Image (cartoon, helix red, strand yellow):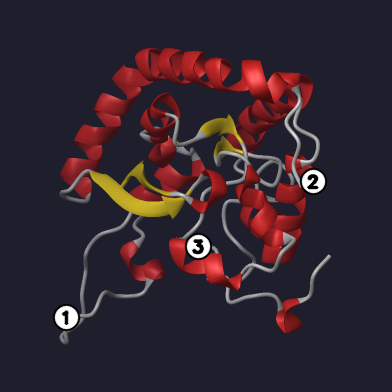
Amino acid sequence: MHKKGVYEKYIKRPQDFICGTCGFIVLSPVMLITAILVRTKLGSPIIFKQERPGLDGKVFKLYKFRTMTDQKDENGNLLPDEVRLTKFGKMLRSTSLDELPELINIIKGDMAVVGPRPLLVSYLPLYNEHQARRHEVRPGFTGYAQVHGRNSITWEDKFDKDVYYVDRISFLMDWSIIFQTIKTVVKKEGITSNSSVTMEAFTGTKNNQKK
């Protein structure tokens, strides 16, 4: 069971609020330009909203810039991700510009600057007991798994790293991850998986193995 230390109890949330607010103010010109380009190249809505599980699995609405078109086949079904993800969309993802609206989620308290990334609500019943521990803390804009492989590692490795973070949250660890994130984004490391332009869907751990 996760036990909060002094940093997590009294410092982390205020620090997140300050960082989120300052980031929103400083990056607002970048967000405005990005919004205009998204509207021009991909259409509307500019902001992609999706329900994601947060602290203790409580669902909230995540905000991101859209990176895909709404192209459909003759039957009205959306085309595969690799078709709808344009060159511009790939650029947004590789630079993490698509995630800037999540600063609003940080300010609101849905998210933290650092924590396990918020995934799909449909994954909730697929986690084993160990993996579900990732929801013992607020999800993050970036996280330990994001600077140690991002989308190039398996789901199981990613969840192991999430839980590793949950058990070791500290001021120094958070800021280490923040600086490593900047390095990862600049180098564009681990953006895609080894077999897909986006991370393959999580379908559960084989045999539902528990750590």
Residue occupying image coordinates x 40% and y 33%: 105
140 versus 178 height, above or below: below
Q: Which residue is mark 1?
A: 76
Q: Secondary structure at mark 3?
A: loop
Q: Which residue is mark 2?
A: 164
Residue occupying image coordinates x 66% and y 23%: 9
N-term mark: 1 or 2: 1
Gap between marks 3 and 1 measured at Cα: 22 Å
How packed mark 2 is, by other alpha carbons closer than 10 Å (few <14, some 14-19, many 20 or more), is some
In this view, the residue in front, 70 or 114, is 114
Residue occupying image coordinates x 71% and y 20%: 7
Is 5 placed left or right of 85 in the picture?
right
How packed mark 3 is, by other alpha carbons closer than 10 Å (few <14, some 14-19, many 20 or more), is some
Q: Return the x and y of residue 62 as percentages of the image width and height.
A: 37, 45
Q: Quadrant of residue 75?
A: bottom left
**Which amino acid, by three-letter code, is at mark 1?**
Gly
N-term mark: 3 or 2: 2
Is 24 placed left or right of 53 in the picture?
left
Q: Return the x and y of residue 13 as percentages of the image width and height.
A: 56, 22
Q: Return the x and y of residue 84 as percentages of the image width and height.
A: 31, 65
Residue occupying image coordinates x 22% and y 64%: 70
Quadrant occupied by the C terminus: bottom right
Q: Secondary structure at mark 1?
A: loop
N-term mark: 3 or 1: 1
Can the viewer see residue 181? Answer: yes
**Which amino acid, by three-letter code, is at mark 2?**
Tyr
Q: Return the x and y of residue 71 as percentages of the image width and height.
A: 21, 69
Can the viewer see residue 200? Answer: no
Q: Which mark is residue 198?
A: 3
